[in-house]
Image: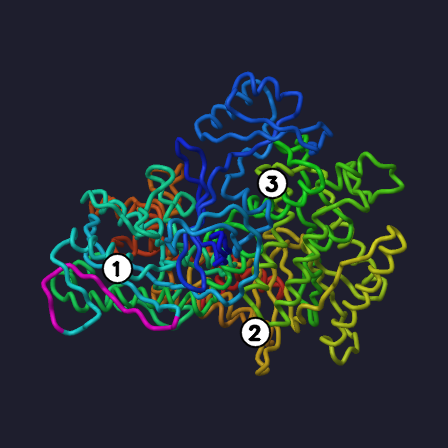
């Protein structure tokens, strides 16, 4: 260390927060370094916002302790701006309220100090701080400067999966912990309430719930995890722990150096309100959805069986609450194994899906807090604002749009029918490519509207974009280059993170929640997309092939009855390359721009059905089914928008639909199969496939309509006198009877087979039968005469 005592430290920022005191603001960053945990404080900071310079006198007169400083920055209306520096949180809130009352625009007031400090320095996740250690404390650093660094895999995180078991009323039975340290040494631990038993050395026995909480605090202090994984870990496990800590009047000291678990909004147990300094919390459900994994349901039992081929270690999963209490009372060792198994399943799901590397990559790319899901508007601001400031501008105080909204993605009228040899061609990242190609940018539009038309790129609805001064096209280009490099490196989590971020940019510009929202911007993306799709269709049809459908960025090309093409896949690749080249030439000639549009071959459907709308000869949209040839030579079915991929259809309907199209595409009989299934249904031999399973998206009392699964849930609550069956998230299994929907477990009435025949089988059979010029009524009537 230099004689002056000043030095630098590097690390990965796990959590960030602003500390408020009478002395002012201090920014606190909890890092993980290659030598262990480190807390970095940046003192003497302020909350920053911007106001027009003409308002400075009024602001300083009303708030004498607030500092205003004139800058060379302007707003989008070209007004000179001044920075406002406030060292008191309460005073800043008063300023916000006063500015609204006096109609004074306060720009970028929503940016939190600990976030602004990083993004203005282009720091996303990894940082180097310059300063000194506090009073010879090797775990506490006082910083005066910071800059971004790239640490890669140098930082090893200590990760643990956590799961809580409890009674119906919330009393804790046990807490499971599963993971490994930085050296890949395993962790297996369950803290269990009860008298000590022999059998497993990884069980720590405690006398009661209070001692369990004390033991958990001691474990966190000793082991110091950097990341907690779990399943509904924020909304259930940590929320329950906080309640039990509060009940016993014990500080929930689970964070760095004994920092307590807190919630920024009282009784709002959500990831965005969680505050646990030094510890990142990742919920499996939220991060699977963030990475665009899709499941019919997101219970740990269901997802683990889908991904890992195994489920919970418990006999009665559907009634696991009663089973857990029984085990606690009668077989605590079995409960401990179950508790630890749940932790392991979550750990292995994260490993299988690479969710932790995905979360890290997302934070590195966007500057969002490590572990924060969603927040696409915040991610856009993090990427855009530092470049905007260096260009001499501040963000708008509110959206600029006049209320005229942009159209959605292009969806072509389809040509219904049963086809052979359909090629699907997709534009690679169409909207980001449009942004790059046509220089679509918030600042670029403001500047372009001030320039001669001949020197700009024309957009839509009056937009024009500067050819030289823009930000977003370069950001997209860097992201695209980084994604290509990630693909070359076979870094799937990074590639997926970049793809999601790139595709979110249009959504952000089209959102009223974003201050950069302007319908001219969003329309210049979507309407340009319409033009590109329509022009692509025309070019393909000029070559003698028919486009039967198009959707946003996909074009469906029919090669024709007698196309004579020996290798449709090779032809599809060549056709896509030819159209891509044609776009390069056209955009260069018409706009004097370089095209980033790239059309790619996606798939070859050997058989394909584009159905009609029900009761109409008009072709459907966003609904089709096709068959592709797999590597083993079998036909694999792909459903889009059909009942097969929707949760409100019975297992029977899904199975029959799949078999119908499998038979149709393999030129096998479908009518005899349908008739046989209708007969089996009415004989009661398919009852197990008639159970609907739907989740309550809100509590029962919040529903306005009495839809079937809500009715069934209410019946279950009333019959069992148990309100838990009506809580948000509860899964309801029910059947339709002659007396309406009834819970499967409590069914008293006969099943209404006519409902399943008319409302479940008929809708999925009609698109196939119409091709055979037969109606469902004819088929069923013929079958009934044979019974």
Q: Are marks 3 and 2 in contact (CB under 8 Å)?
A: no
Report how far apart the C-alphas of labels 1 and 3 lie in the structure. 44 Å
Camera-near label (2 vs 1) is: 1
- What is the crowding at mark 1: few (fewer than 14 residues within 10 Å), some, or many (at least 20)? some
Q: Which residue is disc 1 drawn over? A: 219
In the rendered structure, the answer to whether residue 177 lies left or right of residue 131 reads left
Pick whichever, 212 or 581, lies toward us. 212
The residue at which mark 2 appears reads as: 636
Horizontal side of 657 relative to 552 (left or right) equals left
Where is the C terminus found, in terms of image quarters?
Answer: bottom left
User: Residue 281 appears at what percent x and percent y?
Assistant: 39, 54
Which region of the structure is painted magenta? 183-198
Question: Label 3 belongs to which residue?
Answer: 511
**Position of residue 755 measured from the top left corner of the image (x, y, whole percent):** 41, 54
Mark earlier in primary sequence (1, 3): 1
Q: Is residue 268 above or below residue 255?
A: above
The verdict on residue 192 being magenta is yes
Q: Report if residue 414 is visible in the image.
A: no
Q: Check disc 2 and report its element: helix, strand or loop.
A: strand
Which of the two residues, 690 or 480, is positioned nearer the viewer here?
Answer: 480
């Amino acid at each position: 260390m230099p004689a002056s005592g000043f030095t630098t430290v590097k690390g990965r920022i796990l959590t960030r927060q602003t500390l408020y005191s009478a002395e002012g603001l201090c920014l606190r960053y909890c890092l993980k370094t290659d030598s262990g945990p480190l807390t970095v404080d940046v003192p003497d900071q302020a909350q920053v916002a911007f106001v027009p310079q003409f308002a400075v006198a009024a602001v300083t007169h009303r708030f004498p302790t607030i500092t205003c400083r004139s800058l060379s920055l302007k707003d989008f209306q070209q007004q000179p701006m001044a920075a406002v520096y406030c060292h008191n949180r309460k005073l800043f809130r008063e300023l916000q309220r006063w500015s609204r009352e006096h109609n004074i625009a306060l720009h970028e007031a929503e940016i939190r100090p600990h976030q602004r400090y990083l993004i203005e320095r282009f720091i996303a996740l990894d940082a180097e701080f310059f300063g000194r250690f506090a009073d010879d404390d090797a775990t506490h650093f006082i910083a005066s400067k910071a800059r971004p660094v790239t640490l890669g895999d140098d930082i090893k995180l200590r990760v643990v999966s956590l799961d809580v078991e409890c009674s119906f009323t919330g009393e804790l039975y046990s807490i499971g912990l599963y993971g490994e340290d930085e050296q890949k040494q395993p962790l297996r631990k369950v803290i269990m309430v009860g008298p000590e038993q022999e059998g497993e050395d990884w069980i720590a026995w405690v006398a009661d719930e209070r001692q369990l909480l004390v033991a958990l605090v001691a474990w966190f202090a000793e082991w110091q995890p950097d990341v907690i994984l779990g399943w509904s870990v924020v909304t259930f496990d940590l929320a329950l722990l906080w309640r039990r800590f509060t009940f016993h009047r014990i500080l929930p000291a689970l964070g760095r150096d004994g920092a307590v678990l807190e919630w920024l909004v009282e009784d709002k147990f959500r990831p965005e309100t969680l505050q646990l300094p030094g510890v990142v919390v990742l919920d499996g459900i939220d991060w699977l959805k963030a990475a665009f994994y899709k499941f019919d349901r997101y219970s740990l039992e269901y997802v683990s069986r889908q991904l890992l081929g195994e489920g919970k270690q418990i006999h009665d999963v559907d009634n696991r609450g009663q089973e857990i209490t029984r085990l606690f009372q009668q077989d605590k060792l079995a409960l401990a194994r179950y508790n630890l198994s749940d932790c392991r399943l979550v750990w292995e799901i994260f490993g299988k899906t690479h969710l932790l590397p995905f979360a890290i990559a997302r934070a590195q790319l966007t500057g969002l807090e490590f572990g924060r899901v969603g927040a696409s508007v915040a991610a856009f601001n993090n990427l855009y604002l530092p470049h905007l400031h260096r260009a001499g501008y501040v963000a708008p105080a509110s959206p600029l749009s006049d209320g005229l909204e942009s159209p959605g993605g292009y969806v072509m009228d389809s040509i219904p029918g049963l086809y052979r040899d359909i090629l699907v061609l997709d534009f690679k990242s169409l909207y980001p490519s449009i942004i790059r190609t046509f220089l679509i940018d918030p600042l670029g539009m403001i500047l372009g509207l001030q320039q001669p038309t001949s020197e700009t790129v024309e957009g839509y609805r009056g937009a024009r974009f500067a050819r030289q001064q823009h930000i977003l096209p370069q950001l997209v280009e860097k992201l695209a280059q980084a994604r290509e490099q990630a693909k070359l490196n076979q870094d799937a989590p990074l590639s997926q993170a970049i793809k999601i971020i790139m595709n979110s940019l249009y959504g952000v510009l089209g959102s009223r929640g974003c201050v950069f929202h302007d319908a001219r911007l969003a329309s210049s993306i979507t309407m340009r997309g319409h033009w590109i799709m329509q022009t692509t269709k025309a070019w393909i049809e000029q070559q003698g092939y028919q486009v039967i459908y198009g959707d946003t960025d996909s074009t469906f090309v029919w090669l024709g009855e007698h196309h004579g093409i020996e290798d449709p896949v090779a032809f599809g690749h060549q056709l896509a390359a030819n159209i891509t080249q044609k776009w390069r030439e056209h955009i260069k000639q018409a706009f004097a721009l370089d095209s980033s549009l790239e059309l790619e071959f996606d798939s070859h459907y050997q058989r394909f059905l584009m159905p009609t709308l029900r009761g109409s000869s008009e072709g459907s949209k966003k609904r089709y089914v096709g068959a592709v040839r797999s590597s083993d030579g079998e036909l694999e079915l792909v459903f889009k928008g059909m009942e097969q991929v929707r949760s409100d259809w019975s297992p029977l309907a899904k199975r029959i639909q799949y078999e119908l199209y499998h038979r149709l595409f393999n030129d096998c009989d479908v009518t005899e199969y349908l008739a046989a299934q209708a007969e089996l249904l009415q004989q009661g031999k398919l009852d197990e496939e008639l159970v609907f399973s739907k989740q309550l998206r809100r509590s029962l009392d919040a529903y306005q309509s009495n839809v079937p699964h809500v009715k069934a849930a209410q019946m279950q609550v009333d019959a069992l006198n148990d309100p838990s069956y009506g809580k948000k998230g509860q899964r309801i299994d029910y059947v339709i009877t002659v007396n309406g929907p009834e819970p499967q477990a409590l069914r008293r009435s006969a099943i209404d087979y006519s409902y399943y025949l008319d409302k479940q089988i008929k809708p999925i059979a009609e698109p196939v039968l119409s091709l055979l010029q037969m109606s469902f009524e004819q088929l069923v009537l013929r079958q009934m005469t044979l019974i």
